Amino acid sequence: METDVITELWQDRALLPRVPVATYRLQFSRAFTFSAARQMVPYLEALGVSDVYASSYLAARPGSLHGYDIADHNRLNPEIGTEEDYERFVAALQDRGMGQILDVIPNHMGIAASCNPWWNDVLENGPSSAYAEFFDIDWDPLKSQLANKVLLPILGDQYGRVLENQELALEYADGAFHLRYQETRLPIAPRSTTLILGHRLESLTATLGEADPHLQEYQSIITALTNLPGRSETAPDRVRERMREKEVIRRRLARLVEACGPVRASIEETVRIFDGKRGDPRSFDPLDRLLDDQAYRLADWRVAAEEINYRRFFDINELAAIRMENPAVFRETHRLILQLVAEGKVTGLRLDHPDGLFDPPRYFLALQRERLAHVACARFDQQGGVAEPDRDAAVAVALQRFDATCQPDPAKAGCPPLYLLAEKILARGERLPIHWAIHGTTGYEFLTLVGGLFVDTSHEKAMTAACTAFAGQRTPYADLVHESKQLILQVSMSSELNVLGHALSRLAERDRHSRDFTLNSLTHALREVIACFPVYRTYIDGRSPEVTLQDRACVEVAVAFAKRRNPATNVSVFDFVRDVLLLRYPENADEAYREAQLAFVQKFQQVTAPVTAKGVEDTACYRYNRLVSLNEVGGEPDRFGISVEEFHRQCLSRQEKWPDGLSATSTHDTKRSEDVRSRIHVLSEIPREWRAAVGRWHRWNRRHASEVDGRPAPDRNDEYLLYQTLVGAWPLGPMGQEEVAAFTARMAPRTGPRTSSGVSEPPRVPRSRVTRVWSCSRSTNSRCSRLRLASSDRRMAGVASSRSPGARRTFVPTWTAVLSSRSVRPRFSSDRPSPYEGAVSK
């Protein structure tokens, strides 16, 4: 009977994923709520949208406009609406047969402004926190002073100055103490509370008397705090004891303070003493000692680049990475999401930045297994008469059968039951592994493909010459990418590189053939290999007997280019790095060595992706300005368009291998909307007119030239970018002028040189300068018409998208020209009036 049930299960239509035909991105925030989305559903249905594509609406940092800083995975964001509002939104979709794809953020959580209860618990209890293993924290970092501590780079200046400037304030409330710094409220470790309660114990004893029951309770509380398990004790029973007893003690202290005035007054006076007196440095010693006893170390935000000991999303300190490879983390962060899927309210998931995960393919598989297990259990429960042990055994067999379909052998690949899209950026020539338990990507590669179709390839030399003549940019794009990635490793992610370097050094010390490699030589080799990496990351996991051909080729290419760029470096150190990354173990390697080598490789893979993203998308793409419409996320700025034949060849490949992925032409991450890119594409058709126009505009605007710190602001390369931006956003109204000025301000840190502290210090372009450049040459607006710019390319791109394999994706700002600068807070549709309102009124 068990075999029959499993056979029926595989024929169950519930295991067939809902595949969208056309999606529409909804960016939820306090400015666009569930109620607003519900009102929009009839309009979306009229457009032919089959599925809405929702940004994350789980509880995020208060005031978040993007939702990527989730603070609680198991609660809807109250700023977006109530559960009743959400149910009505879902009902509106279901009444029209529409689905919902939800944006899932598995890589990190928001921790700013004390918004995250899990993170706050870690700060209070250190390694003994129940959530210590949820976050990717190095409790034994290179800097010994940070042992069993988390570095918190949240201060606006050096710690000593902030402390003695009285910017750190001790607070008491409801039986617990906290530290206040601006909008951040940090917990004080329970055991260190004895430093506060004992500070004026003699004075309190004199006031109450030894026999006073309130004093005895006060002393008992101090004793209980002293006897709490230490924060370095991580045995489960000791962790539970600490969590239980600290809450009991907190309630005791709260009751005592409420009942006894002298105790309350003593604590208030102690808090005042700990806050110190400005102008008297010694008065801050008590608070300094207290903070030294915490599970965190406050630091200037500039320290993060070199010493931070928790993994982040890219280099953003306020987004702490979580360890999704930990089954407990997976369960706790997906309970609500999987419940919504099981109830049919969510029909697909968009997985944000899976390249940051320790093991992306296994994460995809875990989601599919959860869906399969739910459908299987539901079927067995409907049939009845199946004992729970038998049901569990049958489900296990079904899962084993599913696992067998998710193998590197394409012939065995099955159909995953839950529609999953991975936000995976594919490099040129990279192929999405066919055995991944997903249905495709979010479509960046298609955006690049269809954009290249509308670039006139015959004018590549002319456009290159125009850029070189005006901006003086002669560095090949590949070299610029290499320089940009080196820069990121030097200024904003040097801590990650240092950690990898020391880990590789420890591994080298364990084998006599590699022990002579110095720390510096290994770190240098790693820096070069990462800077030369041709893709965002590899996916070597140690489960397969052989490294895949694609992963092996990526490593070997990176090492070969690193050798070529460093002819004076001993090639043997690069060979050692190559062998480590390809899991070529020494002949005498024991199991411990193999485990250490694999752990290093998987950590290495988590570093290459953010370095590439920051180095390419956020740096090189703002410095290589030949035709900036090609400088998009996942774009190929050095590839000047594609042929029609190549377009069709790649579409056929998509149809054959990933027919259900998204076909996007604009997303919330793109730097420019379809209209802006389409107008800039047209410049490739008229390079002679374009070159003349740029020279003319430069002469007109020469009188507005300025210098900042001895450098032109903007320099010629930035000016070239600005002119393309103005053409792309043409015609500009008052709102457009403001948007271009804001875009220029956001662009500046990405184009300017950086300091050793990681702080970008570009020549600042005053907003008034941009306005003057535009307004002084009012004839610019009219002369743009001579460039014969039109939005026909954009319409043709829409036709190409709708007729190509995959689900068509629409993003709200594609209605109008929108500029954005990719960051954790890009410009979303909620920042500007929605065309939906006008369309409905018509």
Image (cartoon, helix red, strand yellow):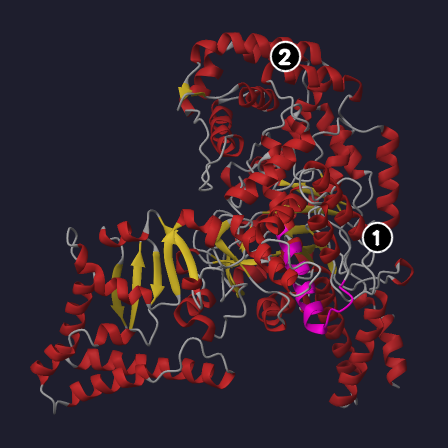
Residue at the spot 59% in from the left edge and 69% down from the top edge: 329
Nearest the eye: 675 or 223 = 223
Residue at the spot 85% in from the left edge and 69% down from the top edge: 404
Nearest the eye: 581 or 269 = 581
Q: Is residue 406 magenta?
A: no
The answer to which image quadrant residue 447 occupies is top right
Q: Secondary structure at mark 2?
A: helix
The correct choice, above or below, for 713 with respect to 91 in the image is above
- Extreme-right residue of the structure: 411
Q: Residue 625 location, x and y as percent? A: 62, 25
Judge left or right: residue 265 versus residue 372.
left
Q: Report the quarter where the C terminus lies.
A: top right
Q: Is residue 591 magenta?
A: yes
Residue labelled with disc 1: 549
Nearest to the eye among marks 1 and 2: give it: 1
The correct choice, above or below, for 68 with respect to 810 in the image is below
Can you tell which mark lies on residue 785? 2
